[in-house]
Image (cartoon, rainbow, N blue to C red):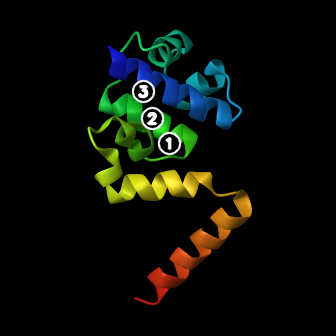
Amino acid sequence: MAKNKEIGSILREYRVKNNYTQEDVAEVTGLAPRYISQLERGLSNGSIDTIIKLCNAYNITPNHILAGLLDKPENCYSYNSIVNYNKLNEKNKFVVDSLIQILLENQ
């Protein structure tokens, strides 16, 4: 149950960051507002399909939600990258995104 509460807290954080109400998320995902509330309070488990719908709504990957639940997330390279990226301001996120795009184009 503790993991459900952690996941719920993360889901709520991303909903709020996107300036969505639970009703907004329900409209975008097709999930019931009551179910979204239960997920955010840790009272329900979300299926993989539900997590994917929420990730699509919040423009994030499942790593944003699940990586912090690993026993040793600091050993996970992508987790560290996401944590550090999220600490950047919007201008620096744009710089990082642009740099990644340049690197991908020049492989």
Q: Which mark is residue 53?
A: 2
Tell me the quarter of the picture where residue 72 sits: top left
Residue on which disc 1 sits = 56
- Give the Cα distance between marks 3 and 1: 16 Å
Distance between the alpha carbons at the discs numbered 2 and 3: 15 Å
Q: Is residue 57 visible?
A: yes
Vertical placement of 68 versus 13: above or below? below
User: Which element carries disc 2, helix, strand or loop?
Assistant: helix
Going by the numbered disc 1, the residue's amino acid type is: Asn
Q: Residue at left 65%, top 72%?
A: 95
Q: Earlier in the sequence, mark 3 or mark 1?
A: 3
- Label 3 sits on what residue type? Ile
* Residue 96: x %, y % from top left: 59, 70
Where residue 7 appears, x then y in whole percent?
42, 27
**Label 1 neighbourhood size at 10 Å, few (<14), some (14-19), many (20+)?**
some
Left or right of residue 104, residue 14 in this image:
right
Residue drawn 44% across and 47% down? 61
Circle 2: residue type: Lys
* Residue at horizontal 38 percent and vertical 39 percent from the top: 68
Choose between 92 and 37: the one closer to the eye.
92
Q: How many marks?
A: 3
Q: Nearer the viewer, residue 101 or 1?
A: 1
Image quadrant holding the N terminus, namely: top left
**CB atoms of marks 2 and 3 within 8 Å:** no
What residue is shown with label 3?
7
Q: Position of residue 39 (x, y in %)?
A: 45, 17
* Lower sequence index among marks 2 and 3: 3
In this rendering, position of residue 54 left or right of residue 27: left
Labelled disc at residue 6: none
Please tell me whether mark 3 sits on a helix, a strand or a loop. Answer: helix
On the image, the x and y values in percent for residue 49 come to 34, 32
